[in-house]
């Protein structure tokens, strides 16, 4: 998604609300037990803060589907990430403004990647599997002689 700051300036405004659905070209993880469900939803505002500078404030929402890393049950969870990022045409470290345009692709990709779960759980208090019989402890106590 490209935001053209010239269009905003031509309208005599200093900000613009935006919404878009985004399907990245690459996977964010090579974990086989989870996958992002497309599309990723992005809603936010760009503020022109000066000549050659802007500020992005947006919420990125995505769903992850896969197997819980503790109990192996299939599950789906939604994640929401707040992104607040200053941009400048002279930026070498961050996200540059190039020809009065902002490419949100890298900003959104980085936000999703940095917020992908390391351990994908069906719920925060998942009890996992019994180490003896392999029974799902979320469904009740197992019948084996638990140590």
Image (cartoon, grey):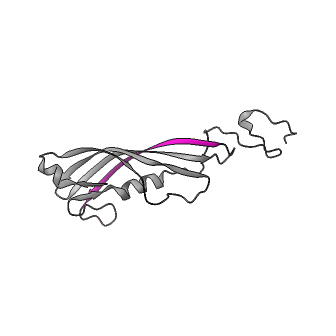
Q: What residue is at 17 percent from the left and 49 percent from the top?
A: 8
Relative to 142, is 63 above or below? Answer: below
**Which quarter of the rendered picture does the N terminus lie within?**
bottom left
The boundaries of the magenta stretch are: 72-91
**Which quarter of the rendered picture does the C terminus lie within?**
top right
Q: What residue is at 23 percent from the left and 48 percent from the top?
A: 47
As for residue 53 lying within the magenta part, the answer is no
Main SS category, magenta section: strand
**Please, which residue is most extreme toward the right here?**
145
Rendered location of residue 61, percent (x, y): 43, 44
Q: What residue is at 20 percent from the left and 63 percent from the top?
A: 99
Q: What residue is at 34 percent from the left and 65 percent from the top?
A: 93
Inspect this view and state whether residue 118 appears: no
Rendered location of residue 67, percent (x, y): 63, 47
Inspect this view and state whether residue 65 appears: yes
Rendered location of residue 37, percent (x, y): 50, 48
Q: Nearer the viewer, residue 96 or 7?
A: 7
Q: Quadrant of residue 105?
A: bottom left
Rendered location of residue 146, percent (x, y): 84, 40
Q: Is residue 13 left or right of residue 128?
A: left
Q: Is residue 17 left or right of residue 128?
A: left
Q: Is residue 99 left or right of residue 140?
A: left
- Tell how many labels: 0
Q: Nearer the viewer, residue 116 or 86?
A: 116
Q: Quadrant of residue 44?
A: top left
């Amino acid at each position: 998604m490209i935001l053209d700051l010239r269009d905003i300036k031509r309208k005599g405004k200093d900000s613009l609300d935006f919404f878009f659905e985004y399907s990245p070209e690459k996977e964010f993880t090579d974990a086989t037990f989870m996958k992002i469900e497309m599309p990723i939803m992005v809603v936010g505002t760009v503020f022109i803060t000066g000549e050659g500078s802007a500020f992005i404030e947006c919420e990125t929402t995505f769903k992850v589907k896969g197997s819980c890393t503790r109990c192996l049950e299939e599950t789906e969870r939604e994640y929401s990430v707040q992104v607040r990022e200053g941009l400048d045409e002279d930026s070498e470290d961050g996200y540059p403004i190039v020809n009065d345009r902002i490419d949100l692709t890298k900003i959104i990709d980085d936000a999703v990647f940095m917020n992908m779960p390391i351990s994908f759980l069906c719920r925060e208090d998942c009890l996992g599997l019994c180490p003896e019989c392999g029974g799902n402890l979320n469904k009740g106590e197992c019948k084996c002689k638990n140590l």
